Every structure is written in structure tokens, then in C-alpha cells.
Amino acid sequence: MKLCKKSKKPAKIRRNNIAFIKNIAIILSMSKGEKACNNFENWNRGLVQMEKKIEDFIGYIHIMKKASENTEISYRQDLLKMIRFLEGQGVETIKEITSVNLHSYMNVLETQNLATATISRKIASTKAFFLYLQDQKYIIENPASELKAPKIDKKIPAVLAIEEVLKLLEEPKRGSAKEIRDQAMLELLYATGIRVTELLTLTIDDVNLEESYIICKNKERILPLGEVVKIALQRYLDEARSELLGEGESVVCFVNCSGKPMSRQGFWKLLKYYANRAGLKSEITPHTLRHSYKAVSTDCVK
């Protein structure tokens, strides 16, 4: 008996099945890729939206709260770190953030051995941000309302003895333009107790030697000047400032040797320099003179 040839139809069917399976696989992979792409786009949109709200908030405290540049920088950094953490927890938009999310974030901060003051500032920035969002009607409930700052152990500020202060104030005595400026700055800081930021941002228009006062715009207050600091300031304005400015111009009262506004770091260095030259063993910071002023003022009141 003659055997029939095997049909090729089953092979065709098999090839068609394989092609069909491949097509399904391609469709599925494309679908997954599209879904992943959509997820990424949603995540990216959420990130941009949250960062925009942070910038809106920084603009608000700059205009309405007259926040300092340092405060704005710190708050921005704190809030950006917070949303990065929350994104890692699957939170995509601000409206999804809950009190549980925020407490979780604060618990993580506490495990990082951060200073208590640093954690307190981060909590303050978080609370201020969400209170702003609530006031703007962007959120209904405030997830940060129950956050509480840790207790900060208050340290007694270091102060200088009067003898130490006098040694320090007498150090810029060589008569150069720089030392005339430095003496005026040290005398003013000690005589008025103003903050270092206020000292460095003081403008020429803020100084009134005829009426014996300066204006601190940061806190909108007028501070009287004694005779010693008046003489130091007058000498600086008459003899040294124009030399330091050279051909430049500046509204800031105290300028560096390049005619530019002095930085906090620059002032800290000159303070440490004169403290070493005076042979002071106490640790000196820009706040030391301010606290020393307060101590002397309190003793005078008593």
C-alpha cells in the first residue's frame, strides 16, 4: 500500500501560531513600555508641580514675611529634601501627602544624628509651607499641623569680660584703612548689640551721626550711638571708606578691600584675627560681642 505524503498544513499552522505569539509579545511589551512612560511622565509632572509650589512659598515669605536670604535658602533645601523622600515613598503630588508621611520623614531625620536645632528648623519650614498651602486654599487639611519640634537645650551664651572686650577693641590700632574700618565695625557691634547680618547690610543712609543713631531695617528699629562709636564711625567714613572703595561705588556702609560688601565669613576671620592678636583665650564668634553687649546692658540696668 502506498503511503500518502505528510501534509505541510500543520507546519503552516505552527508557523502562524508562533508569529501570532510573537505579535502578542510585541504588543504586550509596547503596552508595558507605554505604561512605564506614562508613569514616568506622571511622576515627573508631580515633581515639577511640588517644586513650583515650594518656589511660590519662598516668594511669599520673601515679600510678605521679609525673610532673610539665609532663611530662604534653608527653607528651600529643607522642603526639597522632604519631597525627594516622599517621592521615594510613592507620593506623587502634594495633595497626597498625609500626616503619616510627614511623621515618617521626621522619624528618619532623627536616625541621622542631626542636631536638635536642625530638626526643629526642618519642622518649622514644613509647618510654614503647609500652612501657606492651606491659606492659599490649595489643600483643605493640614498634614503638618500635629508636627512638634523637639525640645532644644538652651546653652548659656559665651560672653567676654570687660577687660577682654577692651583688649579686642584696642587691637585695630595701626591706622591703615582696613584697621580703621575694623575698629568701627567692632565698636558698633559691641555698642549696639546688632546682629552680624544687620552690621554687614547697614547702608550709608542708615547712619546718622548728626543725630547719633543708626537704623536697622531688618527689625525696623532705631539704635542710639555713644560718643566712642560715633568717633570710630566718623573716622572710617572720612578717612578709610573712600580708599577701600577705590573707583567703585556701594550703598553698603562697610566694604572689603575690593570695595565690595563684606561677607559673614570675612568678618568672622577678622574677628578671630584680632582675638588672637589680643591674646584672648576665650572662643570668639561674631555673636560673642553681641551677647557681651547684652550682659553689660543687663548689669547697667540692675
Image (tube, rainbow, N blue to C red):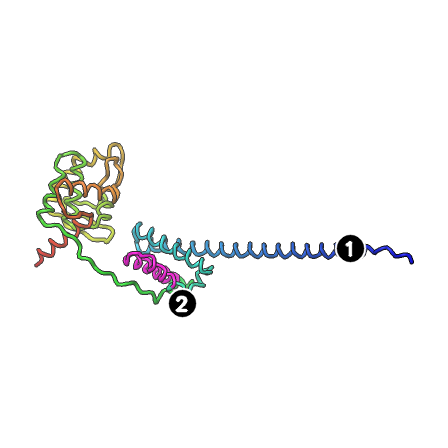
Give the percent coordinates (x, y) of residue 142. 38, 66
Foreground residue, 95 or 85?
Answer: 85
User: Which residue appears at 30% of the width and 63% of the height?
Assistant: 149
Secondary element at image label 2: loop
| Quadrant holding the N terminus | bottom right
Disc 1 crowd rating (10 Å Cα; few below 14, some 14-19, many 20+) is: few
User: Which residue appears at 68% of the width and 54% of the height?
Assistant: 22
Q: From the viewer's perspective, is 181 left or right of 249?
A: left
Residue 122: in magenta span: yes
User: Which residue appears at 73% of the width and 57% of the height?
Assistant: 17
Give the percent coordinates (x, y) of residue 134. 39, 64
Give the percent coordinates (x, y) of residue 48. 46, 53
Residue 63: in magenta span: no
Q: Amino acid at mark 1?
A: Ala
Q: Amino acid at mark 2?
A: Glu
Q: Which residue is mark 1?
A: 11
Foreground residue, 124 or 3?
Answer: 3
Q: Which residue is mark 2?
A: 141
Foreground residue, 201 or 112?
Answer: 112
- Given contact means CB atoms under 8 Å apart, are the residues at marks 1 and 2 in contact? no
How many numbered marks, from 0 up? 2
| Quadrant holding the C terminus | bottom left
Give residue 226's mark: none
Closer to us: mark 1 or mark 2? Answer: 1
Q: Earlier in the sequence, mark 1 or mark 2?
A: 1
Q: From the viewer's perspective, is 154 left or right of 120?
A: left
Give the percent coordinates (x, y) of residue 224. 14, 50
The magenta span reads 104-133
User: Which residue appears at 34% of the width and 51% of the height?
Assistant: 73
